[in-house]
Image: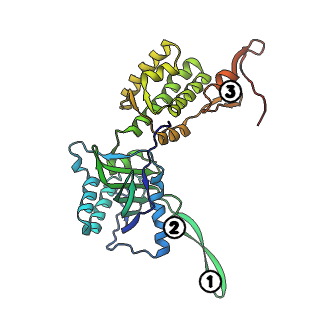
Amino acid sequence: MSPKFTSMINRKNASISKFIIHKVGNKFNSTKNAFSEKEVHFDEASYQLMLPFLLKPFGSLVQSYRFNHHANVELNEINSYTSQIFDENSEFVAISKHIVTHLFEQSNSAQIKTGDVLVVYFNEIKYDTISVDAIGVFKIENKVNFFQTYLENQSFDVAVQKGISAKKIDKGCLILNTRDVEGRIVLSVDNNGYDAQYWTNHFLNIKKADNANQHTENYIEFCTAFSSEVIKPNYGNQEQSTFLAKTIDYFKENEVVNIDAFKNEIFEEDQHKTQFEDYKKTFESEQDVLIRNQFDIVESVVKKQKRKIKTEIKLDTHIQIKLDIDAPDAAEEYLERGYDEEKKMKYYKVYFNEES
């Protein structure tokens, strides 16, 4: 059996019932907010472009969040404001202004960008097996140049205008009207992560959910760090790449990670197992995370983390050897490392049948 797959949302039946645009300033630069008094009413073409533009980024997410607060999560501003909208739909415009004001209060440096803020009420978003309402908050920070042609004096001319690109949002979150044991479910994207604290920690004040997605991500990040901090400096690039390939192979072939079974399959020597155990304690302390000793594997998280892993061997002779992370035994079987006494240089010998 293959590892289980966890998706975030499906937007097939989703719709927008309320939509408003405000502008957020930056108190550090003395630029002020500008508020709308009425909701946007779309024409058909704008609506058909806007709905997928806002929701598409959330379909591929593998991580969800929950609201956080140092005293009481009910005091979390965005949690409170969105709960009011869910409970008192008629207050949408007024509460949307409070959301923008709260965002404005987080602009504590010159690099925080001003922009358009969209507050949106969605219906019928499918999350897991249920359909729920959701509130979206989106910040448009960057506008792109585009050409606009126009007719003047019986001839066409062209001018450059600025507008919002329909390709991707800069920052956005979805607060779903559903809860689990950890609280209300939140999804977030940030494609302009110039200040990681600003959107996630200060504006939303959210933490990653304590679920199989997070356990899978933490474990692979731990293994990646172990390969860089312990294996590479002590045993070399080839051993590092082999370890990472075996790690990904283990996640592909199993439904559950058990740390003892993992160590026994990946490492042959007790010394390496001890180093792994010791580094686990260091990683947990430095990163302030808990690496679970057993958890369910989430296939979508493995695929996402796999794309981040680099298995190139970079040499000072301007040559790179790229190893296939999906072939964990290839480096051991077909790559040989040695030392040439005559040239006084290290070398790699690669075995193959055909070039492709």
**In-front residue for pair 342/354:** 354
Identity, as a three-letter code, of the amino acid under mark 1: Leu
Label 3: how many residues lie within 10 Å, few (<14), some (14-19) or many (20+)?
Answer: few
Percent coordinates x, y for residue 62 in the rendering? 44, 45
- Tell me where residue 51 appears, x and y as whole percent: 45, 65
Q: Position of residue 239 (x, y in %)?
A: 59, 22
Mark 2 residue crowding within 10 angstroms, few (<14) / some (14–19) / many (20+): few
Question: Would residue 344 be found to the left or right of residue 291 on screen?
Answer: right
92 or 17: nearer the viewer: 17
Determine whether the residue tagged by mark 2 lies in a helix, strand or loop.
Answer: strand
- On screen, residue 59 versus residue 208, left or right, reads right
Which numbered disc covers residue 163?
2
Amino acid, disc 2: Gly
Measured Cα–Cα span from mark 2 to mark 3: 46 Å
Quadrant that contains the C terminus: top right
Residue 243 lies in quadrant: top right
Frontmost residue, 219 versus 109: 219
Q: Which residue is mark 3?
A: 316
Quick one: label 2 or label 1, which is nearer the N terminus? 1
Q: Which mark is residue 128?
A: none
Estimate the spatial distance between the alpha carbons at disc 2 and disc 1, rounded to whole Å: 20 Å
